[in-house]
Amino acid sequence: MNSLLNLGHGEPDLLVPTLQSLLTAQGEDGSWPRAAFFIDFYGGYYGSEELTTALCLEALARAGQWVKDDSAGEAVT
């Protein structure tokens, strides 16, 4: 979602399914499961629940701003 918004693709048909997917993947404790953030040249995967959760929270915060801007009839950036 962050990448879509960074690239100026704030279309609802792209963002709504992404937002739904984020919310579905959220754990009962409010965190998200670990996802690979970096893969080294030897096939090692690096990531953490904390990093994944931080990125998901950023996406949700930006989605909230997107909804606010969109409902006001302003351009979404």
Image (spheres, rainbow, N blue to C red):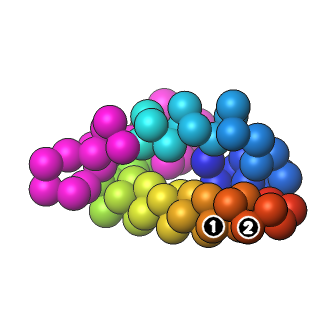
* Within-10-Å neighbours for mark 1: few <14, some 14–19, many 20+: few
Separation of disc 1 and disc 2 at Cα? 6 Å
Q: Which residues are magenta?
A: 23-43
| Mark 1 or 2: the one toward you | 2
- SS at circle 2: loop
- SS at circle 1: helix
Quadrant for residue 23, please give it. top left
* Residue under label 2: 72
* Residue under label 1: 68
Q: Position of residue 2 (x, y in %)?
A: 64, 55
Is 16 left or right of 76, judged from the image as shown? Answer: left
Q: Position of residue 67 (x, y in %)?
A: 62, 59
Question: Residue sitting at 13 percent across and 48 percent down?
Answer: 28
Cβ–Cβ under 8 Å for marks 1 and 2:
yes
Residue 16 to residue 48: above or below? above
* Within-10-Å neighbours for mark 2: few <14, some 14–19, many 20+: few
Question: Residue sitting at 80 percent across and 45 percent down?
Answer: 9
